[in-house]
Amino acid sequence: MPNGADSILVAWRPPNQPNGVITKYTVNHQCSSSGSATKSNEATVSRGCSNEIHRETVPGNRLVHEVRRVVDGHRYEFWVTASTHAGEGLGGIHATTVASVRAPARVAAFGEQVRCISGTTVTMACPSAGSPAPVREWSRYAGLPDDRARVMPDGALKIDNVQPSDAGNYVCTVRNAGGRDEIQWSVVVVRTPGPPVLIVSPEASLALRVEWRVPDDGGLLVSAVMVAYRPTRGNWQQQQADPDIPVVHLTGLQCGAVYQVPSTPAI
């Protein structure tokens, strides 16, 4: 995305199959001999434009990079590679653009759905490109949580102490004299699951059958249930239940003992 006469902003998505932890990205770019000029002045625009490939390294936790020292009117080609400890992968789709002193406003990011646990902090990115520099605005149909939301220097919206009422779609709009652009983030707020409901019944000699259900999963599928049990004067023991099978069998119990059976779900 053109970001002025001497700057272009490049944004990308992580690979669908990273095959490991991404340690860095490499932004590859080269100048093309054919700029946005007409045939009559193509030779003039091409002058000083080398086909040499330039490589710039970006940390693995970043998905946008500004390429500087480009020339107004020249066309540039970009592609990005990802690296893990195993080495550098293949390049993705090649994209081209022309450096320009006048460029419409663009958002250099991709809207996503983000899931966060109630009480934590969520950050939604909205880097922008364009010349003149775009004006940025964040909005939500129900309004922003003014007491806990703030726009960071890089344009990201940060919400502290996220609450269930903060769930919804957030829109970042950028505009300048050349145009406007926007992206949408969808925030889903989840909570820790509520207490399970238990039904405990004798099953056989020295065994109990424990049936369970979780009325409030907090917005996520329950991934595990730990059944803790003990005789009145004994030590606690635990048995993990399959979250897809709402029953667990406790065996090898003490004859005649009275057992306590609380249960805790985990997401």
Image: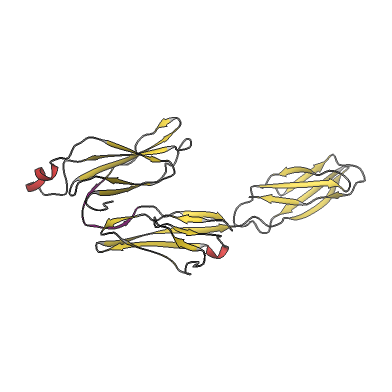
Q: Nearer the viewer, residue 148 or 168?
A: 148
Q: Nearer the viewer, residue 197 or 211?
A: 197
Depicted 165 relative to depicted 213: above or below: below
Q: Is residue 265 left or right of residue 93?
A: right
**Is residue 8 in sight in this rendering?**
yes
Q: Is residue 69 left or right of residue 264?
A: left
Q: What residue appears at the point 68 percent right and 59 percent down from the top-left corner?
A: 215
Q: Is residue 11 left or right of residue 200?
A: left
x%, y% of residue 175? 31, 63
x%, y% of residue 146? 49, 68
The kind of secondary structure the magenta stretch mainly shows is: strand
Is 194 magenta? The answer is no
Q: Is residue 43 left or right of residue 81?
A: left
Q: What residue appears at the point 48 percent right and 63 percent down from the top-left corner?
A: 149
Q: Which residues are magenta?
A: 96-108
**Is residue 244 in sight in this rendering?**
no
x%, y% of residue 11? 35, 48
What is the total number of numbered labels drawn onto the structure image?
A: 0
Is 98 magenta? The answer is yes
| Residue situated furthest left in the rendering | 40
Q: Nearer the viewer, residue 39 or 198?
A: 39
Model colouring: secondary structure
| Residue situated furthest top in the rendering | 86
| Residue situated furthest right in the rendering | 256
| Residue situated furthest bottom in the rendering | 142
Q: What residue appears at the point 34 percent right and 40 percent down from the top-left corner?
A: 80
Q: Quadrant of residue 193?
A: bottom right
x%, y% of residue 260? 83, 50
Depicted 1 relative to depicted 150: above or below: above
